């Protein structure tokens, strides 16, 4: 039997949010000076060549993309220490909001970071991937670069729906849902000084960067035990 659209009327509908995937962002205050210092530092390190370069070329990385080794948050440079503190404080606050740990339990947690920086020039991009061996990941934007007006997707980060079977059937009944129940990807356009945090299992990709000014970000994985 086919029935045309109708409102529920007096029926009481209870909705339970299942299998939600949290994503969070935080903006560091007065970011201009810090981001300028980080940009200058990272470009100088890139110019040194292999001194800080990650020895492993990842299969998902293409084009002119420089990746540092994963010890960034252990660097002694003041701007790096400042951004590392901000990233850690943001993740701690996020976990306090999302968990029911007591203060005693929370104080026993240990946060183990792998962090690095990326410098991407025109034509560089990263294919679909996630971050293994961690529970949380983050991307802090130092400089989003410049994007040609005709290419609004330049350098954007697209996160993919982790419900692998959600797109097996598509029709108005499921594709018309509002957030957080909608289907499909979620796009993030970087902004200087903003940190985006997400569960490490989330598959994501970075579209080809088309700007002229280098695009610079810091990324981290965090294992919490």
Image: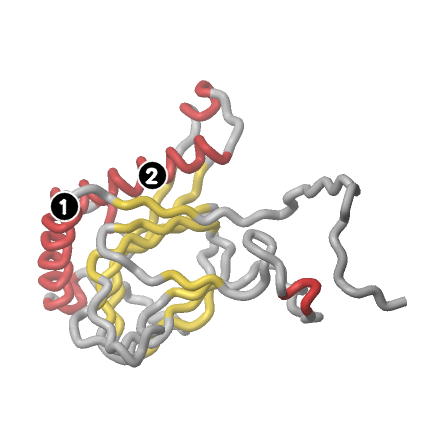
Residues under numbered marks 1 and 2 in contact, where contact means CB atoms less than 8 Å apart: no
Q: Which residue occupies 40% across, 33% down?
A: 110
Few, some or many residues within 10 Å of mark 2 (<14, 14–19, 20+): many
Few, some or many residues within 10 Å of mark 1 (<14, 14–19, 20+): some
Q: Nearer the viewer, residue 109 or 128?
A: 128
Q: Image quadrant of residue 11?
A: top right
Residue under pointer 1? 79
In what element is the residue under mark 2?
A: helix
**Residue 17 spot, x, y in % from top left:** 64, 44
Q: Nearer the viewer, residue 81 or 189?
A: 189
Label 1 vs label 2: CA separation?
17 Å
Q: Image quadrant of residue 96?
A: top left
Q: Which residue occupies 16% across, 62% down?
A: 51
Q: Image quadrant of residue 181?
A: bottom right
**Residue 214 spot, x, y in % from top left:** 18, 69
Residue under pointer 2? 90
In what element is the residue under mark 1?
A: helix
Q: Nearer the viewer, residue 90 or 57?
A: 90
Q: Which comes sooner in the sequence, label 1 or label 2?
A: 1
Is residue 161 left or right of 174 when viewed as pictured? left
Q: What colour scheme does the image use? A: secondary structure
């Amino acid at each position: 039997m086919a029935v045309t659209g109708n409102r529920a009327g007096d029926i009481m509908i209870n909705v339970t949010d299942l299998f939600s995937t949290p994503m969070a962002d935080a903006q560091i205050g007065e970011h201009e000076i810090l981001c300028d210092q980080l940009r200058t530092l990272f470009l100088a390190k890139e110019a040194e060549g292999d001194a800080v370069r990650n020895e492993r070329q990842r299969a998902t990385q293409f084009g002119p993309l420089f990746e540092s080794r994963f010890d960034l948050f252990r660097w002694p440079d003041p701007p790096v220490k400042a951004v590392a503190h901000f990233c850690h404080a943001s993740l701690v606050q996020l976990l306090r909001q999302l968990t029911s740990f007591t203060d005693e339990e929370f104080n026993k947690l240990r946060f183990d970071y792998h962090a690095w920086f990326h410098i991407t020039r025109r034509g560089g991009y990263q294919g679909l991937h996630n971050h293994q061996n961690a529970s949380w990941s983050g991307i802090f934007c130092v400089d989003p670069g410049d994007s040609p007006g005709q290419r609004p997707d330049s350098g954007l980060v697209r996160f993919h729906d982790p419900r692998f079977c959600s797109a097996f059937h598509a029709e108005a009944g499921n594709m018309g849902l509002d957030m957080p129940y909608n289907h499909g990807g979620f796009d993030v356009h970087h902004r200087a000084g903003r940190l985006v945090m997400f569960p490490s299992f989330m598959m994501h990709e970075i579209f080809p960067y088309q700007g002229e000014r280098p695009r610079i970000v810091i990324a981290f994985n965090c294992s919490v035990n």
